[in-house]
Amino acid sequence: MIKEQKAEVAIIVIVDQNNGIGKDGDLLCHLPNDLKHFKKITTGHTIIMGRKTYESLPKGALPNRINIVITSDNADNYPGCIVARSVDEAILLTKDKEKVFIIGGGKIYSSTLHLANKLYLTRIHHKFKDADTFFPEIDFNNWELIEEEKHKADDKHLYDYSFTTFIKKE
């Protein structure tokens, strides 16, 4: 069991209307503003991800962040990253950090949602029929919406989307 969790544990995720998050190891669509939003929020902090999420990153470890990868693989396969063997170990590695972000994928989200006290949820206002990876169901009775920013589709964004921030209710 996790001991002395001091950091704010936040989940950051982009989902469609069916809680789909990916297809074939990639995002469901390209939303440049979501990538900027992600970078702005996570830069300077620690991020925790699973092996498949790491492998989906085009250039490996994300710059200006402490990258922790949860895997049973050899640590040499993850340059620029700290390797943890479990969610518990990853969280223990962050006990002296102020803020930690869980960035995916599906299995990691499922095993950490109960630990999170903040949720940055980008909602794509569309249902992708071919999603094969999903975010776990969220009981919104346990979360309070503290911020919402709605955006319409435009020449760079094929779908309407919203940035929302929730905090876990006490």
Image: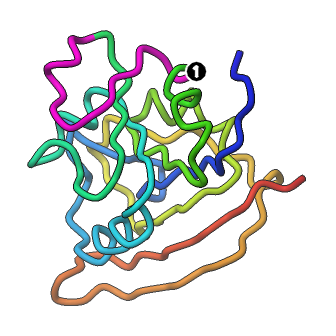
Can residue 59 be seen from the camera position used here?
A: yes
Residue placed at 68% from the left, 64% from the top? Answer: 166
Image location (x, y in percent) of residue 44: 40, 61
> Residue 86: percent from the left, percent from the top?
48, 17
- Mark 1 is surrounded, within 10 Å at the Cα level, by few (under 14), some (14 to 19) or many (20 or more) other residues, namely some
- Which residue occupies the extreme front position in the image? 96
Residue pictured at 49% horizontal, 74% vertical: 163
Q: Nearer the viewer, residue 19 or 44?
A: 44
- Amino acid on which disc 1 is placed: Asp
Instruction: Give the left or right position of residue 81, taking residue 2 as reference.
Output: left
Q: Secondary structure at mark 1?
A: helix
Indicate whether 13 appears above or below 131: below
Is residue 81 magenta-colored? yes
Q: Is residue 99 above or below residue 83?
A: below
Based on the picture, tell me whether residue 111 belongs to the magenta stretch.
no
Residue 149 image offset from top left, x and y in percent: 53, 84
Identify which residue, 81 or 32, lies in the foreground.
81
Q: Is residue 162 left or right of residue 66?
A: right
Give the residue drawn at x 45%, y 27%: 107
Tell me where residue 17 appears, x and y as whole percent.
48, 58
Q: Compared to 56, does 62 lie above or below?
A: below
Please tell me whether residue 14 is drawn above or below residue 157 in the rendered image: above
> Is 5 displayed left or right of 137 in the figure?
right
Say if residue 15 shows up in the picture. no
Identify the colour scheme used. rainbow
Q: Report the residue marked by disc 1.
A: 88
Q: Quadrant of the N terminus?
A: top right
Q: At 83% from the left edge and 54% from the top edge, which residue is drawn?
A: 141
What range is drawn magenta here? 73-88
